[in-house]
Amino acid sequence: MRPFTHKNGDRLPKSIPPKAKGRVHANDDDTQTGAFPVVRRRPPRSLNANANRARLVTSVLVALMCALLGFGYAVQVHNNQSSYQSLSEEELVRLLDETSTQVDKLEERKSQLNQQLASIKSAADKQKEAARIAQQNEQSSGLLSGRLPAQGRGVVVTISEETDRVDATTMFNLIEELRNAGAEVISFGDVRVVTSTYFLDTKSGLECDGKKMKAPYTIRAIGDPDALQNAIQIAGGVGSRIKVQYHASVGVEQSNSVKIDQVRRGQDYQYAKTVE
Amino acid sequence: MTAVLGLVLGVVAGIFLQPDIPIGLQPYLPIMVVAALDALVGAIRSYFERSFSDRVFVVSFISNVITATLLVFLGNQLGVGSQLSTAVIVVLGIRIFSNVSSIRRFIFRG
């Protein structure tokens, strides 16, 4: 890089001064021959301190991230428990649908159960009614068939014979008159009068349902006392006939409490069967 | 250690402060949490692989959260928010599962 020496320079023509100026620079370069340009080094830092600081920063960052995660998690968990606020519109609609469907189902179930309850109640009522009717039937049929003792308002008819015996037909007429007048329960002496009661004339006297009867006869009948009394004592009725025909005395006494204790065992029907 | 400490601190702060989340942020918070969880599990895995880099962790944490949120936000804009959030959850779940399974291999060597 140095083409010209001072000696060579003497050979050059002197008409080129600019080059001489350049040569001055060349001389400046000369002083720093053989060295690379000095790059200023960064100020030396302690490697150890740097690493420590970096580690601190990164661990703080990591902790911050993890704290964010934990924070978000806790907040979300809390938030999720509380309300429907975070649900989207369609989710809310779906929820509403589900709820209303459930309500409908429950309503249906309720009405079913109500129906069931009503039917059970009516069944119970029916059963009660049936029991009541059965009891009623039992009572009335018991009275009718003579199975149960009875008492109530009615009349007591006393017939005392003088000489002639009252015959069976007349007695039966008397009973029939009482029945027509609405007597519900009748007893003749110590025989309960039922549908199958018969009177029979025998040599020894009147027989009723296989029992010998002796005067005076006592006939008790439960029913409307006035009607019963009228039935016996009506002019030309059975009472007067007994008086006139058989010269017997007929006494009719109304009573508020006629008691008929005579009962009779239930009849076993051999031929008749109930129609189912 | 600092990670566990931070986690505990965050949970405690969340429980005790009980902040009200702004309504606008509510649909995104669960997604954010899952994304962050994915980043955390990934970090644990890389820790076991001895290639844990805090810088990578921080960047992946933030980018995970932001990406998931943006995706769900986009879905909400397009009207497929719930589907897209399901998709994000599924993908993150798969990633969490695979990361956990590799962690398990590191721990149990099998």
Image (cartoon, coloured by chain):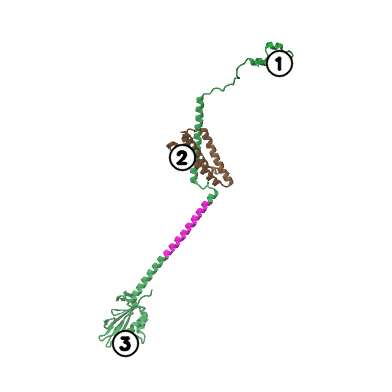
Chain colours: A green, B brown
Measured as percent of width and height from the top left, residue A191 is found at 29, 79
Q: Secondary structure at mark 3?
A: helix
Q: A258 left or right of A37? A: left
Measured as percent of width and height from the top left, residue A236 is found at 36, 87
Query: As displayed, is residue A111 above or below residue A237?
Result: above
Dot 1 corresponds to which residue? A19
- Magenta residues span A94-121
Q: Secondary structure at mark 1?
A: helix
Q: Quadrant of the N terminus of chain A?
A: top right
Measured as percent of width and height from the top left, residue A41 is found at 57, 22
- Is most of the magenta stretch helix, strand or loop? helix
The part of the image, by quadrant, that contains residue A172 is bottom left
Measured as percent of width and height from the top left, residue A156 is found at 32, 80
Query: As displayed, is residue A248 above or below residue A121?
Result: below
Q: Quadrant of the C terminus of chain A?
A: bottom left
Classed neighbour count for the residue bearing mark 1: other residues with Cα under 10 Å, few (<14), some (14–19), many (≥20):
few
Q: Image point 50% across, 53% down: which residue?
A: A98
Identity of the amino acid at label 2? Ser
Q: Image point 36% across, 73% down: which residue?
A: A137
